[in-house]
Amino acid sequence: RKGENFAKTIDKKHFGLRKEKLTHFRVYWHDILSGSNPSSVVINPPISNSSFFGSVTVIDNRLTTEVAVNSTLVGQAQGIYAATGQRDASALMVMNFAFKTGKYNGSSIAILGRNAVLTKVREMPVIGGSGLFRFARGYVEARTMWFDQKSGDATVEYSCYVLHY
Amino acid sequence: RKGENFAKTIDKKHFGLRKEKLTHFRVYWHDILSGSNPSSVVINPPISNSSFFGSVTVIDNRLTTEVAVNSTLVGQAQGIYAATGQRDASALMVMNFAFKTGKYNGSSIAILGRNAVLTKVREMPVIGGSGLFRFARGYVEARTMWFDQKSGDATVEYSCYVLHY
């Protein structure tokens, strides 16, 4: 009957999957809310002024090789985060790290997890990837390098461990 | 050239991955919209009053061991859900179960899936985890225990099957 067999089994070799390898890298994620060209923009305000709960932010943040904002750019962190803690400063992070240099150009990893921003080291899952990071699984460890109370700007180190083919 | 070799392959043993184990647990997810301290707040209204389609809700819902709201708290469900069905009552769920007790304190699982809320049993994927639930894969079965038509409050049982290291 119509529409019943749109899917069919193909040979797994199509994927040409060899052995999984573990890749590690550190990138610096720059959350810039201030200035004339912010990369992180609130698209929904908090529900009250007693906490950030309910706020939603869209980001296209620089990913660089060093802590300095203008160090070598390796990609962009594009996604959203929502303030989802009513009693703890934590956010739901849903973002892609899109890489732009060398062999990783055009590849990405997808991160979705809980970011308890005041905790020294926060762990979030890598839930997938594309290109060289196809079938990615793993996790990132996020550490805040600096945070400007006034502007809200921050640089966070993402130490990423990615298992992929 | 600059920025091209920021990533390197490391030994998988770094992960110290032994055998995957399957963990099962039941928690009760309390979606409280009513009262002075709701844990579930609509941050974007539906696009029309003919259905919920388009509405976005942010949650920091209690996760307890029994159906009763004030039974033992084991964690919080922090995330967002969006009403994504135009002809069916279904939602996109994107949430972290952040656990707070015993050895699971600080660990979490990430759930992303389709919640057909009027269906007796709804299955959603577990797409990742952190801490003890690192590399988590699995699924949850959601069953509505009670739903208050007037206030919109509900308690839903989440029976979670998680494969992890």
Image (spheres, coloured by chain):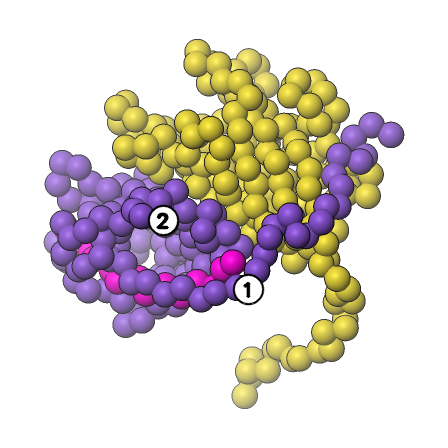
Chain colours: A yellow, B purple
* Magenta segment main secondary structure: strand
Q: Secondary structure at mark 2?
A: helix
Q: Give a yes or no on whether discs 1 and 2 share a subunit.
A: yes
Q: Tell me the crowding category of disc 2: few under 14, some 14 to 19, or many 20 or more residues within 10 angstroms, Cα based.
A: few
* Residue type for callout 2: Lys
The boundaries of the magenta stretch are B151-165
Q: Position of residue A79 (x, y in %)?
A: 54, 39
Q: Which mark is residue B19?
A: 1
Q: Kindly identify which residue carries mark 2.
A: B103
One can see residue B22 in this view:
yes
Chain ID, mark 2? B
Picture layout, residue B1 above or below residue B26: above
Quadrant in the picture for the N terminus of chain B = top right
Q: Is residue B113 above or below residue A82?
A: below
Q: CA distance from mark 1 to mark 2?
A: 19 Å
Q: Is residue A9 magenta?
A: no
